[in-house]
Image: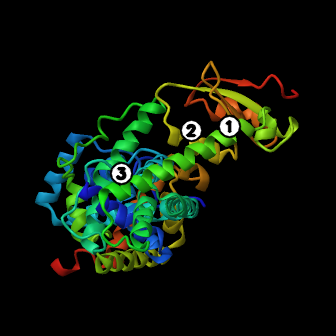
Amino acid sequence: MIRAMSLRSFLDTLAGSRAAQRTFFDQARRAMLGALARKHPSLPHALLEDAAMQAFEQLWNHRIGAFSSPHPPGSDAFRHDLVRYLAQVIAPRRLVDQLRRTGREVPVADWVPPGDDDLPDDALFDAVLPAGNDGVAAGAERTQLLHRLARCVDHLPAKMHDVVRHVLDDVRQADIAQALGIPEGTVKSRMSEAVKRIKRCMAIGKERS
Amino acid sequence: MTPSADEPQGQDPTASPEHRLLQASLERTLSAEERQQLLAAARNDPAVVDDIATYALLRALRLEQRMARHEAPAWDRFQELARQHAAGQPASGWARWLAWLRRQPGAPGLSVPRLAAACAAVVIALQAGGLVWLAQRPAEHAVMRGGDGLAMCPAVLVRLKPQASASDFARVLMQSQARVVDGPDAQGAFRVIGPAGFAEEAGALFTELAQDVRPAADCPR
């Protein structure tokens, strides 16, 4: 009961402030989509968005089950607990429901049980990129890093830039080859070269050399 | 844009196996063996760690762009949910009602019997009002919904699957600018009206949620 009241009081406050809504929406949506995209990299993004929105609907309808936080509802810590719960529990459940409803199989390779998702690239990924939902500083650092990356991509030679832009626009390599009128192998080699240049531009690994 | 003479035409022969895996990771999930292979390579070669980090950054940037493309409708919907919460607020409304009761003269320490009596009075008033409304309500559903027969078209009768959720139904209704105006009838069908062309598209719109979707017999074809 106290739990439900805390959440209700949090939602009442949130409903009364557009600025607070924006902050919470950004944090929670980013956390949910980030978590879902890491676990299900090959699913269409629209499905992940739907799952995140259903999690929001569930939250506003006070139907998020066993959520509890030891922190007061007005605190940042409470909000972080709630964001984490939405991203790690509610949104993945809604995605699985949706996959079942739409007759899609949940890809076994995509389904990593919570707590067992220490993919090597994610562990390393966390080292270079702050998660974005753990505080303002981490979020700002992450944004800055991604801006730098976008600038590095913009400074690539035209041929490589075209390939990387297509990759970032969700175009598959075979389709990039067709769009640019080049063999798929050329797409791959341009991508490899682009990655080398991006590494240099971002000074990744520079401290070792 | 054509490839230069020094660029490969088929597979990229210069790419290491790890690089190929990382490129593949942009389009599909790596298998457990592939991830192990990448992890083993990363343990032996710090340059592979850097490559993994670079690809991770690219994936993060790609996710940012995807999120940006979907952001406006998601934010609109989120605000709508917040507005609905603020307007409805079932629980906080109750809390406000209690607070109002407590503010009434002589009620600072409102006792349980007095609170119960006040609640009972409200329930009785609501029931009486409901009975009066029931006795005086218009008989025709078109009049009740505030429209004539034509305004109730185009319409379809939708019978939902047992596992369909109300939120999914509401979402499809919202997306298709449709609304439920009657039902469920004896067969469990809801009458749903929507914009022009709705009746033709309704079958596809409700395909995931409905057992069957029929055009309403009283609407012109």
Which residue was labeled with disc 2?
A: B169
What secondary structure is marked by label 3? Answer: helix
Relative to A208, B126 lies left or right: right
Q: CA distance from mark 2 to mark 3?
A: 24 Å
B19 relative to B50, above or below: above
Subunit of label 3: A
Residue depicted at 37% across the width and 70% down the height: B107
Quick check: do tags 1 and 2 share a chain? yes
Residue B77: % across, % down: 55, 58
Quarter residue B52 falls in: bottom left
Residue depicted at 49% across the width and 36% down the height: B165
Front: mark 2 or 3: 2
Categorize mark 1 by other alpha carbons within 10 Å: few (<14), some (14-19), many (20+). Answer: few
Residue A19: % across, % down: 47, 77
Subunit of label 1: B
Which residue was labeled with disc 1?
A: B134
B126 relative to B45, above or below: above
Residue A49: % across, % down: 47, 52
Residue A66 has which mark?
none
Q: CA distance from mark 1 to mark 3?
A: 50 Å
Question: Which amino acid lies under the numbered mark 2 shown in the image of this protein?
Answer: Phe
Which residue was labeled with disc 3?
A: A36
Categorize mark 2 by other alpha carbons within 10 Å: few (<14), some (14-19), many (20+). Answer: some
